[in-house]
Amino acid sequence: GNAVDGDPCNGGGYFGEYWRYGALGGGVYCGFDSNVRFEGCTIAGNVITSGVSGQGGLWPNGSRAEPWWPYLIPAYGAGVFADADSILTFVGCHVTDDNSVNVADPGDPNLPGYRISPYISFGGGLGTVGAEIVTIEDSNFLRNNVTIGGGLYLDNSDFEIVDANIAGNTAIKGAGLYAVECEVGTMTASTVT
């Protein structure tokens, strides 16, 4: 029989949207359909690390079930993560020094874990996937470190940023801000360095 994605009874067990099982929200996790207001808050020094998937076993015919190798599952939002349909507001906040930690190979701690992609962490200060709207006013996102979106990672999340300081963040792509598939996004009177 054919393996059915995600159905261990039919030879599956490999979940196509594996990233949903990653680490979400090192400092704060805002779940589906949340409405959260952060005012005068400091979210700092959080560290997020995700895990490594399992590895498929052998079928009676000798073939291996997916996944063929254990691989790193990504992490989202070292400081704050907001899930789908959330409404987030930051006013006068400081989101600083939040980081993602590399995961070692389970067989050799001196080697990095196997990656499907080199991008293993998203949103150092703030990471969102499918949030309804993110509003940031008079806030700082400083010295956060991940592979994509050092300060902010906004995926399919509309945003309005006013009078923000996004500085000193590091990433492979989008050290200050990385936005993808956002229908409406505005930034006014802000600094990104």
Image: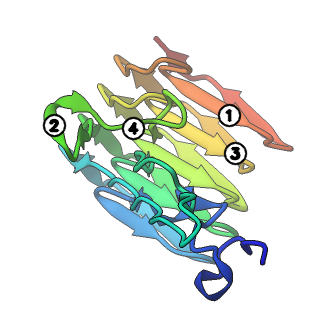
How far is mark 3 from mark 2, CA to CA? 42 Å
**Front residue of this view, candidates 145 and 116:** 116
Specify the amino acid type for callout 4: Gly
Disc 3 crowd, CA 10 A, few/some/many (<14, 14-19, 20+): many
Q: Choose the circle earlier in sequence order: 1 or 3.
A: 3
Identify the element where label 2 is drawn. strand
Residue marked by disc 3: 159
How far is mark 1 from mark 2, CA to CA? 35 Å
Residue marked by disc 2: 108
Residue furthest to the right: 183
Residue 124: which numbered mark, if any?
4
Identify the element where label 1 is drawn. strand
Contact? badges 3 and 4 (CB < 8 Å): no
17 w.r.t. 7: above or below: above
Q: Choose the circle earlier in sequence order: 2 or 4.
A: 2
Residue marked by disc 1: 179
Specify the amino acid type for callout 1: Ala
Q: Which residue is drawn at 47% across and 38% down?
A: 138
Identify the element where label 3 is drawn. strand
Specify the amino acid type for callout 3: Phe
- Mark 1 vs mark 2, foreground winner is 2
